[in-house]
Image: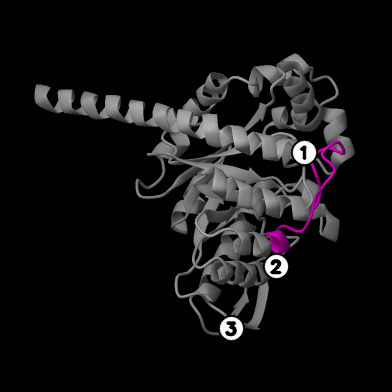
Amino acid sequence: MVAFGYTLMTEQAGPRELVDHAARAERAGFDFEVMSDHYFPWLDEQGHAPYAWSVLGAVSQVTERVELMTYVTCPIIRYHPAVVAQKAATVQLLSDGRFTLGVGAGESLNEHVVGRGWPPVNVRHEMLDEALQIITRLWDGGYVSHRGAHYTVDSAKIWDLPEQRPGLGVAVSGPQSVALATRHGAHLISTEPVAALVDGFPADARKIGQLPICWDPDRDAAIERAHRQFRWFAGGWKVNSELPGTAAFAGATRFIRPEDVADNISCGPGTAVHVEAVQPFVDAGYTHVALVQIGGDTQPEFLEWAQGDLLPALRDENRARGMIEHRERGQAAQSL
């Protein structure tokens, strides 16, 4: 069965609101919750960017059941990997073993703020590989010293380690990042329902996707809000990772029309249209799908609707497809 998650999107809500949304999402029945970790919103219209790790600490105390995850943290420039290892271990302790550290090679939007420049993608993958070596060594316990191509660690030790180390997920977009994630025994993270990515991954790893939707009783209002706050999404990761600020995203997306956004993001009140939007991830073999509801001030109403309509419909559809696949496998086995 596919697990369905809720995204605590730091770009569209303040810290107190995010903590409230997290508690509501657990009560609504979501299986897990993921949180973005950004220094900037994508567009000025979104209007928020609190420090994700402080919010995660609070979220760990107002939830009891849901798994928690960063989606994703970049441990290569803005954060030193030794500090990320410590933060992740602390959240794992606070959440009683419910935390997965999701990491990726980052975006200039969030990493340029410390003034170290923005390296090309192959260098960023080298940095991520080395960062993960440091993080996992620190999770093993004891003192760690390291002098590598990109990082130096001088006698670091995490003093509060959980009995069960945090989970680890890596954002992937192609063969290079898939190979990196596989080397580190990580779960797959992707915002694209690409079966080829899943097929190249170990069968026992989680495949965690993310999908923006825009629920609203008024479809026109949903389309307007999705266009105003989420038109940046059309750029794709290769473009989005290179742009340095909200003004750049506004300029790059100035010709994207509301109808273009509506063609790519499910909008409106109907449950069926949002269930249909999730299915490409299910069909591609993803085991987890986290939904983003666009619009920070719409979350309470969205979560109430999701509890009564969306989640039951998603699970019914998933259950029905599973039964069909089981029957087809049985028929194929009988024909051999």
Mark 3 — residue? 159
Image: magenta residue range? 39-55
Quarter of the image that includes the C terminus: top left
Relative vertical location of residue 297 with respect to residue 75 in this rendering, above or below? above
- Mark positioned earlier in the residue sequence (3 or 1): 3
Residue 126 drawn at (x, y percent): 61, 56
Secondary element type, mark 1? helix
Mark 1 — residue? 297
Look at the magenta stretch and give its main secondary structure: loop
- Mark positioned earlier in the residue sequence (3 or 2): 2
| Mark 3 vs mark 1, CA separation in Å | 39 Å
Quarter of the image that includes the N terminus: top left
Q: Residue at x 75, y 35 (%)?
A: 295
Mark 2 — residue? 80
Between marks 1 and 2 in the image, the one whose residue lies nearer the viewer:
1
- Give the camera-side residue of 284 and 25: 25
| Mark 1 vs mark 2, CA separation in Å | 33 Å
Relative vertical location of residue 10 with respect to residue 332 in this rendering, above or below? below
Query: Quick check: is 40 in the magenta stretch?
Result: yes
